[in-house]
Amino acid sequence: MAKALRSTRVLTPDGFAAATVVVEEERIAAVQAWDDVPAGAGLHDFGDLVILPGLVDTHVHINEPGRTEWEGFDTATRAAAAGGVTTLVDMPLNCVPETIDVAALEAKRAAANGKAWVDWAAWGGVVRGNADAIEPLVSAGVPGFKCFLIHSGIDGFAWVGEADLRLALKKLQASELPLLVHAEVAGPVDEATRTLNAAHSDWRKYSTYLASRPDAAEIEAISMLIRLTEEFETPIHIVHLASAEALPLLVEARGRGLPITVETCVQYLWFAAEQIPDGATEYKCAPPIRDAANREALWNALERGMIDMVTTDHSPCPPEKKRREEGRWDLAWGGIASLGLALPVLWTAMRRRGVGLERVGEWMAEEPAKLADLAGQKGVIDAGADADLVVFDPDVEWKVTADDLHFRHKISPYLGATLHGRVRETWLRGDLIFRDGKFDGAPRGREQVRA
Ligand SMILES: [Zn+2]
């Protein structure tokens, strides 16, 4: 039987409208007038609540198989569902084996089986020496690849220099799949760290950590990536841009038509270095959260379309890895846990800035779906797309407690934050999977394998 979900505020490709979304099987059959409910369809009327497309988060570290005690498919995808994220793309490191060949991809598929509450895909990894694994991974259906230009924190996921990048980009040219790059190079970081250590700087201070990862590391990396994009004419995606100082370079390159896309993360748009307490390693991520003026510049760039999308870079670890009692930024594991909170966090900030909620559709659904080769199928409320829908109350105010976190370890710099807007229901391919804090049914997420 067809279902009809309607409200006075449905986010369609043309903006908010009173509409009825007709769902047949797993897909959206039509988006039509609010009072045009097909005879016999089961009606779910959400009044004045907002209906958004299911969000797509292309930057999540699930860690399973191999480090499931850090985070796994069950807990990560529950957190996603609770936050209105119906598709996530897993990063190829932190799991064991790292997703750097087809055997590892198969191990991931086996690990995910029956545990995913939302749809997912896996990025392949580009590391030193695995150029020959790239084409088989393309054939196995990954939507693209991720690499590091600096130590990743995971010894099994070796960073690549320009020579390795050239090998990988040559292999990627024919596929036209994007290479996602952690854009920091080691030179400026090593140099800054040596200087800080020589001066006996206090590693409990956030200012020491921030100084150890200067803007120059991002700028140098991005300059090289622009040069390689131009040479190889194959798409490159900058993950978690943190330095607004790199924006002029990117604007200029994109202005010349180079296929470079850019994401930033919720933490860079929400926090500022000035507010981060010394020793509070739950805020540690790389690149680091920079100052308030930098945050303002990132917002301006996002609003003006110079940054395409917003992801979480959800990357949790067991509490002991944060070494909170020592509070040393150089020794703590880097990564912020936030899956499930991105929508209310971003919306709270947007509301303060006077930015309309409709842009969430672009930044957190449509653009990331495009990156993951899921345009038209995910991240949009339109005929033919998967019926992934989020019922969102944009006006309710609430405070984040550990009970609201569905990922494995209840550690997050967002604990205690007062937010606006809350996900009431999440629907995956036409089925309710989450309502008012509770999960419905069994995990029925599927891998999205590129055709
Ligand atoms: Zn990451």
Image: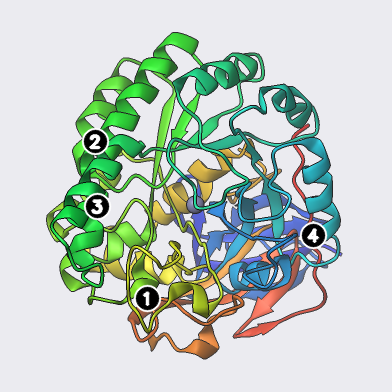
**Measured from the top left, where is residue 91 in percent x and y?**
60, 49
Identify the residue position indicated by label 3 in the image.
212
The residue wearing badge 1 is 413
**Foreground: 317 or 34?**
317
Of marks 3 and 2, which one's residue comes earlier in the chain? 3
Q: Report, in whole angstroms, how far the alpha carbon at label 3 lies from the one at label 2.
A: 17 Å
Q: Residues within 10 Å of mark 3 (few under 14, many from 20)?
A: many
Q: Does 429 appear above or below 131?
A: below
| Residue behind mark 2 | 246
Tell me the kind of residue under disc 2: Ala
Label 4 vs label 3, nearer the camera: 3
Q: Considering the image in quadrants, where does the C terminus appear?
A: top right
- Quadrant of the frame with the N terminus: bottom right
- Going from N to C along the chain, the mark reached first, 4 or 3, is 4
Mark 4 or 2, nearer chain start? 4
The secondary element bearing badge 2 is classed as helix
Crowdedness of circle 1 by 10 Å Cα count: few (<14), some, many (20+)? some
